[in-house]
Structure formats: C-alpha cells, structure tokens
Amino acid sequence: MADSTVLDETALMEECDDDKEFLARMVEIFDRDSSERVPKLHDAIKTGDSETVSAEAHAIKGGVGNFFAAASFETAHKLEMMGRDGILDEAEDTFQRLERELKELRNALGRLLES
C-alpha cells in the first residue's frame, strides 16, 4: 500500500471500478501528457514565463488529481499560484520537489498495476 499522500489507492481503485486495464490507459495518457508538460514547465520557470508556469502547472495538477495524489497535487497547485502571482523566486525548488513527487507517483502506480 502506497503512502496515501503519494497515491490514495483505495479511492483510485473505487473511481476505476477496480478495472486495472482502464487504470493502465489512464496512466499511459498521463505519462504521455506529463512527459510533454514537465519540460515546458521547467523551461518556463527558467525563462521567467509566469503565464506558462501557471498553465502547465494547472494541467499537471489536473492530471495528478485523477490519481488522488495529494502531495504532487498540492505542489503543482503551489507552482500554479506562483505563476499566477508572477512570483517565481521559489519555483525552481518547488519544481524539483514536484519532479520527485511525480516519480514517486509513477512508481506507486506501477506497483499498483502489477499487484
């Protein structure tokens, strides 16, 4: 069982009606989407493009929300608000935390699909 801040497996499996094939398709879509969005988010942070930071973080937040992933949802939300407010002073550190949380989430999803 994963740490519920990484992934609430019970809520996720209820949402998916315990259908791991459906969950696998969700994970595939999330992987494809996040593999495009995470680099765009990082580039926007590096260039100070707060509008893109807000938009990409918002989209990532939506994606992780589908998996009941509280930690990465909250971190993506923080980045979204930093972008919205145009204050990116802590965005790089927050982005690094998001990357770690996304990796933990992906690992937890992989274990869930294999169980």
Image (cartoon, helix red, strand yellow):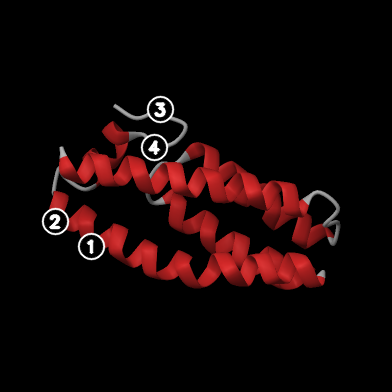
Element under disc 1: helix
Q: In the rendered view, tell whether residue 75 sits above or below residue 40.
A: above
Q: CA distance from mark 4 to mark 1?
A: 17 Å
The amino acid sitting under disc 4 is: Leu
Q: Name the one closer to the observer, 53 or 105.
A: 105
Question: Is the residue under label 1 in contact with that under label 2 (CB below 8 Å)?
Answer: yes
Q: Total label count?
A: 4
Res. 101 visible in picture = yes
Circle 4 residues within 10 Å: few <14, some 14–19, many ≥20? many
**Residue at 52% across / 43% down in the picture?**
101
Could you tell me which residue is drawn at 17 percent across and 43 percent down?
114
Verify CB contact (< 8 Å) between mark 4 and mark 3.
yes
Q: Earlier in the sequence, mark 4 or mark 2?
A: 4
Real-space Cα separation, disc 4 to disc 2, in angstroms: 18 Å
Crowd rating for badge 3 (residues with CA inside 10 Å; few <14, some 14–19, many 20+): few
- Left or right of 4? Residue 110 is left
Give the residue pinned by disc 2.
Answer: 21
Vertical placement of residue 48 versus 68, above or below = below
Residue found 59% across the figure and 61% down from its top:
58
Q: Residues within 10 Å of mark 1 (few under 14, many from 20)?
A: few
- Disc 4: which residue: 7
Q: Which mark is residue 3?
A: 3
Q: CA distance from mark 2 to mark 1?
A: 6 Å
Image quadrant in which you'd find residue 33: bottom left
